[in-house]
Amino acid sequence: MSSPDRRAATAGAHPVAAPRGITAATARREAPRRAAAALPSSRKRGAEQTRQRIVASARRLFRERGFEQATTTDIAAAAGVAKGTLFLHARTKERLLVMVYEEEFRIANREAFAHPPQRVPIARALATILGHFFRVYEQDVRLARHFAREVQFLCRDDAADMCRVTDETIAGIASVIQTRKNHGEIEADVDPALGAANSFLLYYGILTAWLCGWLPAPQARDRALIDSLTLHWRGLERTRATPARRTQRRPAH
């Protein structure tokens, strides 16, 4: 995917461009990762297990108590780590929330693209794939609204991981489109990267409408996604040429 396409695709979900150079905030955020990279393999595993416990504890407490009521002190205690250790992985509770969703979207990516739908129109196939991400938000809509608000205003340094997850999603969609194009189902001049970016932005707009209450029911949300994708892809799918009808010669009298 070209850089302009990636920026266009991530603009809706994560409106942050990659920073040039390394800022002080980036250095602080990357310090735990770099330190972990320098550790022996056994200690790396231990650091990753600690991170997983912190994310799992944050997920559970956010959903049990709500985002406002869950505290970093409670999360650290539930994960069995000191509060300072928690802050090595996430400086704020908001960052913890983003980490929870980063992990869930990575899992959704694997599930969505493991077996892409076949023998259905491209719009319905993409709607099925993107439906995996709707399911992530459905697990706790109230918490999802907190995440949606937070991710819109991430600073450039905190957005990097979330943007990488989004890039993986868009790259997966582009791969599905390329496969359909190779099979002659889509017009030859269609750019899979741009088609993937446009499809993702349609999904993100409908997701936002649902989280805001403009589309109150999941069924209306899913219908809107299919209809929007169908409208978008209708002019891009290759239609089978209908053989010209032969003009029958009238018998001579």
Image (spheres, grey):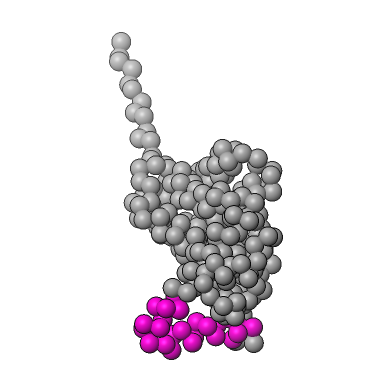
Q: Position of residue 36 (x, y in %)?
A: 46, 84
Q: Nearer the viewer, residue 202 or 58?
A: 58
Magenta residue check for 44 = yes
Q: Residue at x 52, y 83 (%)?
A: 32
Q: Position of residue 218 (x, y in %)?
A: 58, 41
- Is residue 231 something one can see in this rendering? no
Pick out the residue farthest to the top: 253
Say if 247 sits above or below 11 in the image: above
Q: Nearer the viewer, residue 187 or 72?
A: 72
Q: Main secondary structure of the magenta part?
A: helix
Q: Residue at x 59, y 80 (%)?
A: 84
Left or right, 60 with reference to 248: right
Q: Residue at x 33, y 22 (%)?
A: 248
The part of the chain drawn in magenta is 25-48
Q: Nearer the viewer, residue 252 or 179?
A: 179
Magenta residue check for 86 = no
Q: Position of residue 19 (x, y in %)?
A: 61, 80
Say if 88 sits above or below 186 in the image: below
Q: Quadrant of residue 88?
A: bottom right
Q: What number of labels is visible?
A: 0
- Is residue 234 something one can see in this rendering? yes
